[in-house]
Every structure is written in structure tokens, then in C-alpha cells.
Image (tube, rainbow, N blue to C red):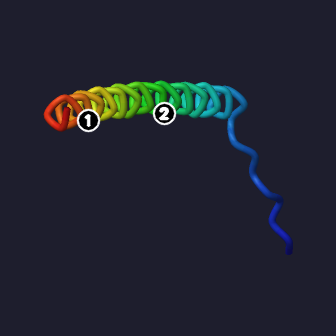
């Protein structure tokens, strides 16, 4: 005899989807925050390199 598949409770499906959606939003936020840190570090590196080059150029004059 073939057993019929059981379907999860609709409320459980709703809760699981809501939790998954929230997790996706949290991951997206973490990604944005990481991008901000990377941009800040890149800007600091550019500023530091610019200062080094200016100093070298002034010394060679």
C-alpha cells in the first residue's frame, strides 16, 4: 500500500519562511557593513600613499 505524503503545517511553513527572510536581511546588512569597512580601509590606504608620495617628491626638490 502506498502511503500518502504528509504536508507540513501551513503555520510552520509561514514561520520558517519569515525566519529565512529575516536571516537573508541580516546577511545582507552584514555584507553592507563589510563593504563599508573595506571602502574605509581603501580610502585610508590611498590617503597614506598620497602622503608618502608627496613627502618623497618634496624631498627630491
Instruction: Identify the residue at the far front of this view.
Output: 61
Q: Quadrant of residue 25?
A: top right
Q: Is residue 57 left or right of residue 4?
A: left
Q: Is residue 4 left or right of residue 17?
A: right
State the residue position of label 2: 27
Which callout, 1 or 2, points to the residue nearer the camera? 1
Tell me: residue 5, above or below residue 18: below
Q: How many angstroms separate mark 1 from mark 2 (CA)? A: 39 Å
The residue drawn where x is 48% and y is 33% is 27
Q: Pick the quarter of the image with the N terminus.
A: bottom right
Which disc number belongs to residue 33? none
Q: Position of residue 2 (x, y in %)?
A: 85, 71
The residue drawn where x is 69% and y is 42% is 8
**Mark 2, residues whose alpha carbon is within 10 Å: few (<14), some, or many (≥20)?**
few
Disc 1 element: helix
Q: Is residue 17 left or right of residue 58?
A: right
State the residue position of label 1: 53
Which one is nearer the viewer's eye here, 4 or 28? 28
Q: Quadrant of residue 30?
A: top left
Q: Cβ–Cβ below 8 Å for labels 1 and 2?
A: no
Q: Pick the quarter of the image with the C terminus.
A: top left
Disc 2 element: helix
The residue drawn where x is 62% and y is 32% is 12
**Mark 1, residues whose alpha carbon is within 10 Å: few (<14), some, or many (≥20)?**
few
The residue drawn where x is 47% and y is 24% is 29
Which one is nearer the viewer's eye here, 2 or 57? 57
Q: Quadrant of residue 42?
A: top left
Instruction: Identify the residue at the far bottom of this view.
Output: 1
Which one is nearer the viewer's eye here, 29 or 12? 29
Q: Position of residue 50 (x, y in %)?
A: 30, 30
Which one is nearer the viewer's eye here, 37 or 45? 45
Q: Position of residue 6 (x, y in %)?
A: 75, 51
Amino acid at each position: 500500500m502506498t502511503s500518502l505524503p504528509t504536508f507540513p503545517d501551513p503555520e510552520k511553513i509561514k514561520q520558517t519562511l519569515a525566519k529565512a527572510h529575516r536571516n537573508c536581511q541580516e546577511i545582507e546588512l552584514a555584507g553592507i557593513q563589510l563593504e563599508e569597512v573595506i571602502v574605509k580601509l581603501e580610502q585610508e590606504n590611498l590617503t597614506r600613499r598620497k602622503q608618502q608620495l608627496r613627502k618623497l617628491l618634496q624631498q627630491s626638490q
